[in-house]
Amino acid sequence: MGDSGSMSIVMYPWLAFGHMTPFLHLSNKLAEKGHKIVFLLPKKALSQLEPFNLYPNLITFHTISIPQVKGLPLGAETNSDVPFFLTHLLAVAMNQTQPEVDTILRTIKPNLVFYDSAYWIPEIAKPVGAKTVCYNIVSAASIALSLVPAAERELTDGKEISLEELARSPLGYPSSKVILLAHEAKNLRFVWKRHEEIGSFFDGKVTAMRNCDAIAIRTCRETEGKFCDYIASQYSKPVYLTGPVLPGSKLNQASLEPRWADWLAKFNPGSVVFCAFGSQPVVDKIDQFQELCLGLESTGLPFLVAIKPPSGVQTVEEALPEGFEERVKGRGIVYGGWIQQPLVLNHPSVGCFVSHCGFGSMWESLMSDCQVVLVPQHGEQILNARLMTKEMEVAVEVEREENGWFSRRSLEVAVKSVMEEGSEVGEKVRKNHEKWRCVLSDSGFADGYIDKFEQNLINLVKS
Ligand SMILES: O=c1ccn([C@@H]2O[C@H](COP(=O)(O)OP(=O)(O)O[C@H]3OC[C@@H](O)[C@H](O)[C@H]3O)[C@@H](O)[C@H]2O)c(=O)[nH]1
Ligand SMILES: [O-]c1cc(O)cc2[o+]c(-c3ccc(O)cc3)c(O[C@@H]3O[C@H](CO)[C@@H](O)[C@H](O)[C@H]3O)cc12
């Protein structure tokens, strides 16, 4: 540790924007307290992350060469470049960066190394005297359900795990509400699936959490205390919480692009539905993409959608239903690029957020005063959605059929249930949401978490 008490920290998150971005938000909070961070990332991610670096004098980006692994698309460096079913090959590529990271750690000799997927970090950090923190940017509930030693599944060679087995919660799991139904459990198959090159996601994550000096989670006790306690008892080690770690006011001072601000300003307060599905392509199938568009059309409300194109097409325009653009002209936009979500959610005209319930979006929705409708796409997002709908009761979830399909009608029903005046469900979630927003946005709430987190790190480094 430096004479002034400042720590030298290296961060190496999983090669996905949904992970790198919250690692960078945490880096900003630690830099604000005077700590120095070297942030390792692939070259391609640099230009997208640089604008979020609020302390360029303390946070240095260091690019890492991501090797070309057989089977990965040419030049793939983050999981935005890789289809979901090839994610394990990106993990193989990340593992091959170990010698480069080793050299960096030997040169910098940091006090702390933060990582999430690169389970081999403790092996190379220990010899240089660094302590390691496995920082998880997904919900504690999703870790507690499938990434603890008690969730190990007996795999018989060549046999697939049954849906009933996949849906089983581990012994001692602390909730009967934040769970997956049997027909949703197929979403978890990837967790235990074995890959010749690297074993399973489960093995990698459990090793990552077993070998670190401390586990950290981007959450708070108020929303997920019992899941955090369960994780701590499963791994017999401290679990530090960072709180929501939303980008500070400095980033929020940026203003919304005029084309969106001007367009939104045409509508009544609280009348527009904003829909966004995160930083990765999620709605895979073109028919589900179209069902989403048609569902929003049938609400009769103005809407703005920020979404990646589905598989098989290059642009969202190619995927739109026939005659759609003509019919919704003037009140509906589907945009394939990036829109500043936190700023849109705080725009006075926006009253409803239709979200995939990625963990970052979950926090942003809780901080906003929008009504929240959830259309989770993957296992972890389904669990986040259950937390929001069944435990906190601040949102509604779009109903799906047993084959996983959602219809335009179920989306329309969900949006109307929270947007129509006098709706009982709408009133209930609005009231509960308001209570949570007050708790979470209380001055001192987020800062309190970061102060305690910093103290935990200092004690860890000194231990
Ligand atoms: O158009 C956009 C899309 C997204 N965003 C921002 O990008 C971030 C998206 O993060 P999320 O965690 O919600 O979702 P992602 O899908 O990108 O994340 C990924 O990692 C976190 C996991 O919980 C998710 O399940 C996983 O998909 C949010 O901060 C959101 O404000 C925009 O600002 N504009
Ligand atoms: O789908 C998931 C279901 C579940 O019960 C747990 C997880 O956990 C994680 C995870 C990721 C990183 C961590 O440090 C801890 C947990 C999941 O991560 C997502 O996995 C995808 C497949 O590898 C990946 O593409 C995405 O970027 C990750 O956010 C998913 C589940």
Image: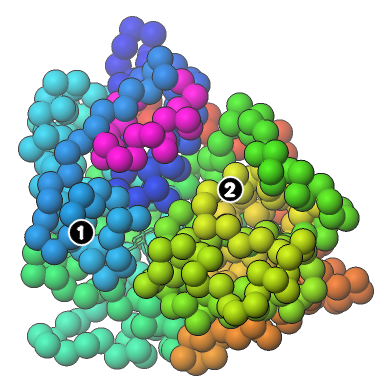
Tag 2: amino acid? Ile
x 35%, y 89%: residue:
163
In the rendered view of the protein, which quadrant contains the C terminus?
Answer: top left
For residue 64, which quarter of the picture?
A: top left
Tag 1: amino acid? Pro
Picture coordinates of residue 168, whole percent (x, y): 38, 83
Q: Looking at the image, which is closer to me, 281 or 359?
A: 281
In the image, the residue with mark 2 has its CB under 8 Å from the nearest atom of ligand 1: yes
x 73%, y 43%: residue:
261
Q: Earlier in the sequence, mark 1 or mark 2?
A: 1
Q: Is residue 432 left or right of residue 375?
A: right
Q: Looking at the image, which is closer to me, 181 or 223?
A: 181
**Element carrying mark 1:** loop
Residue with the mark numbered 2: 339
Residue 45 is one of the magenta-drawn residues: yes
Picture coordinates of residue 364, whole percent (x, y): 62, 50
x 58%, y 57%: residue:
335
Give me the disc on residue 294: none
Q: Residue furthest top?
A: 3
Q: In the displayed structure, would residue 103 be above or below residue 155?
A: above
Which range is magenta? 37-55
Residue with the mark numbered 1: 73
Ligand 2 quadrant assignment: bottom left
Picture coordinates of residue 446, whole percent (x, y): 60, 37
Q: Is residue 133 left or right of residue 392?
A: left
Q: Is residue 95 left or right of residue 261?
A: left
Q: In the displayed structure, would residue 455 be above or below residue 277?
A: above
Picture coordinates of residue 351, whole percent (x, y): 78, 58
**Element carrying mark 2:** loop
Residue 69 is one of the magenta-drawn residues: no
